[in-house]
Amino acid sequence: MIKQTLYFSSPTYLSLRNNQLIIDLKKDGEEQQVTRAVEDIGMIILDTGQITITHQAIKALQANKTAIVSCDDSHMPASIMLPLEGHSEQSERYRNHLAMSLPLKKNLWQQTVIAKIKNQKAVLERLGKPTDRLEVLINRVNSGDPENIEGQAAVYYWRTYLDGFIRDRYGEPPNQLLNYGYAILRAMIARALCSSGLILSLGIHHRNKYNAYCLADDIMEPYRPFVDLIAYNLFQNENLDTFLDPKAKRVLLSVGQADALYGKRKSPLQVGMAYTTASLYKCICGDKRKIKYPQLL
């Protein structure tokens, strides 16, 4: 089942009654009240300082493993609130995660890079762009990616994605669309990893000591091209400038509803992320050898 994503950008009071999230909001000078079942909510995005949420509501949302995302003054997602206990076998899963060997991490990163480049290739194919270089690079990815094929593929991919485009967090459009979409994707992946009882800060490749979401940053890599495709279409069709308008945000927030192939199964990304994180844990335990990553249709 696809969980709802709720986005709030106007004065709102969030409370709980009978396990229903009560939403009292003011919009265009009018007061409205709506309700949502807590168990149907996967993520809440708070994009204004004029939001009040009760502790009872937070407790109920966290018990449901809902990700609560807070945005900064530039309206970009800045923090994620997730429950400490994401799985009934939490301590055992933590022990297994901590015991991962270096060869296993290298193998999992190889799989991750290959899956990412394949989806980048699929994006360029959808856009009618040449992909021969990526096909060559896919076959050169070794365990641990010691030659940084991921980086080489990125250089070609972004130059081909849009003529003259430079991927830079603080760069020209559509960078702002990519930034926003990736932040939403990161929160979704973090939620799925938490539900699978894994340690968000213990990555298979990313290891920055200041990063609390290293594993999410690893696992989201093959998912990024889904955001790239949405951002490209928005930029080309809507002629968006540097400002992220509400319409663009709504479209980017829908990334979890995009369909993908997981092996022979077609599934929305939000559902498929659970397949990915569950298969990751099975790889960690030695029950499986392959992570179930999405394939762009």
Image (cartoon, grey):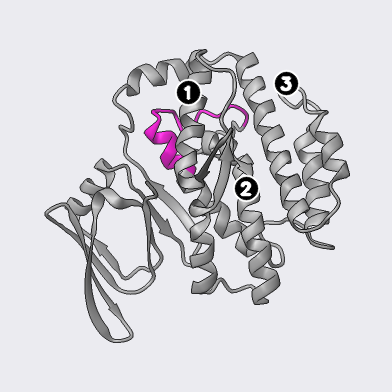
Specify whether residue 280 is in view: yes
Which quadrant would residue 194 be assigned to in this image?
Answer: top left
Which quadrant would residue 21 be assigned to in this image?
Answer: bottom left
SS type, badge 3? loop
Give amino acid for label 1: Tyr
Q: Which one is nearer the viewer's eye here, 264 or 232?
A: 264
Find residue 171 and name its label. none
Specify whether residue 44 is in view: no
Q: Position of residue 199 (x, y in %)?
A: 44, 29
Q: Position of residue 139 (x, y in %)?
A: 82, 29
Query: Label 2: which residue?
Result: 224
- The relative height of residue 161 versus residue 260 in the rendered view (above or below) is below
* Residue pictured at 35% horizontal, 68% vertical: 49
Tell me where the magenta segment starts and ends, as one range. Answer: 189-205
Q: Position of residue 242 (x, y in %)?
A: 64, 72
In terms of sequence position, does the residue under pointer 2 or pointer 1 come before the other? Answer: 2
Q: CA distance from mark 2 to mark 1?
A: 21 Å
Residue 217 as seen in the image, left or right of residue 197: right
Give amino acid for label 3: Ser
Give amino acid for label 2: Arg
Taking the magenta stretch, the answer to whether it contains residue 197 is yes
Q: Which one is nearer the viewer's eye here, 27 or 226?
A: 226
Query: Label 1: which residue?
Result: 281
Q: Which one is nearer the viewer's eye here, 283 or 159?
A: 283
Q: Residues within 10 Å of mark 1 (few under 14, many from 20)?
A: many
Q: Position of residue 171 (x, y in %)?
A: 71, 63
Label 3 close to label 2 by CB (< 8 Å) = no
Find residue 143 and name its label. 3
Residue 239 as seen in the image, left or right of residue 148: left
In terms of sequence position, does the residue under pointer 3 or pointer 1 come before the other? Answer: 3
